[in-house]
Image (cartoon, rainbow, N blue to C red):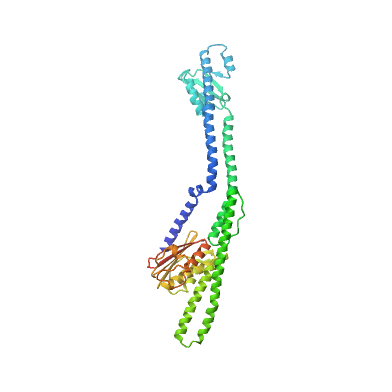
Amino acid sequence: MRSQRCNKIGSWEGIQNIYLMFKWSNFSESLLVRSVYLITIPIVLVQIIGIIIFFELHWDLVLKRNAQSISNEIKILEMEKDSPSLDNYANTLQIIRTDSFDINEAEQVSNWIFKKRMKHSLGQISENFEVMENKTHFIFFDKKKLEYFYMVPKKRVETKTVGGFFLWTIAVSIILSLISYLFIKKQIQPLKRLGIITRSFGRGIETPNLKPTGSSEVRGLIKDFNNMHNNINSTLDNQRNMLAGISHDLKTPLTRINLMIEEINNETLKNSISQNISEMNTMLNHYLDFIKNEKNENLDEINTSNFISNLAQNYKKLEVLSNNGKRIFIRKNQITRAIMNILDNADKFAEKIFINSNIFSNKWKIEIEDNGPGTNLSQEQLIRPFVKGSDQLNQGTGLGLSIVQKLIKLNNGELDFQKSSHGGLKVTVILQI
């Protein structure tokens, strides 16, 4: 039942991830898309307005006049239909008059604008006059009498320049939009590179200075970032060197004291001093671990189930509640140090520790809970270096969870703290796989 429930949750999270991937807001929030909007929308509006003006002031007016002209010519032919020279006059007007035409070969006029104008104009001749078409002609006739059929060539009304006009407007819009897209994309490339460098630097990964390119504003921004980047690195290096120097200098006298206590005969005093020296060495190791400049470790392939099982063997208080197995690639040493720091912290204050390890879609979720006293610190305080709870002022260095936070961020993961249902602290680690 537990595995079925996990599979359902994993499937639902997969659907949510796909939805978020193709969510329109993800595209509309892009600077590139918004910039293209600013150029494309005015172009499209201008083209639409141009088409409307063309139809209202030119094309519709031309069709109206053509319809009126044809209607007047047919009206004259109807009035003089008994004249012997009528056929010659009709030929001059490029109108074919015939009394033998199969109306079933004709169909309704497809050009609705011309049909509307023609119907209005034919009303001046007779309410019974109708217009239809075949492949080459418009056919006008009295639908009640069906005595004569007047055939007008389509080339008198229709023109191919209209199609060319539409194609031209569409082509211009597409070409201008494509040019603007390519131009803006080239301008935004330096910002995208700056974003990648910023995210990597924020996770504690060593990053090089970025070459200033693009517009003058973007080049100025990159130069300012490089200066800030160099200043921060210089400050961190000075702090690391100072703390490393202090820690190494303190280790030397501690080693001497450790050798000197061997001459003490009082075993109680000797054990007490030795225990304090051991605690101080542990604190110094934490300091050195905290200031360590983590290098990009190579990815190792592991089985998540075996990974958790191997860790559990080192902790007698630990109970594994769920442990899904999947082969993934992670930075094994860094993740091991992070999880062990969490477990060591729980092992100090709790009698029972519980762990859940589950795979959901492309995420590995590890939940560690305990039944200890918990903490009165906020999540921000828990990961702040050297901060300890009011009841733990004389215990540890306050660096354990700060180290965990640094290691998890280096691996593009998330760290969350909540109150456990067992009474203590619940630590959740989510890693992208």
Count of numbered marks: 0
The x and y percentages for residue 278 are 49, 78
Q: Which residue is drawn at 57% across and 69% down?
A: 241
Is residue 142 shown left or right of residue 230? left
| Residue farthest to the bottom, as pictured | 265
Q: Position of residue 45 (x, y in %)?
A: 52, 36
299 vs 280: above or below = above
The vertical placement of 184 against 58, above or below, is below
343 or 330, nearer to the observer: 343
Left or right, 317 with respect to 50, comes to left
Q: Which of 335 and 263 is in front in this view?
A: 263
Q: Which corner quadrant of the image does residue 321 belong to?
A: bottom left
In the rendering, at what x and y percent does residue 419 appear? 39, 64
- Residue 125 horizontal/vertical position (percent): 48, 17
The answer to whether any part of residue 345 appears in the image is yes
Tell me the quarter of the picture where residue 47 sits: top right
Give the position of the N terminus as an image quadrant. bottom left
| Front residue of this view, candidates 135 and 387 | 387
Task: Answer above or below: position of 333 versus 110.
Answer: below
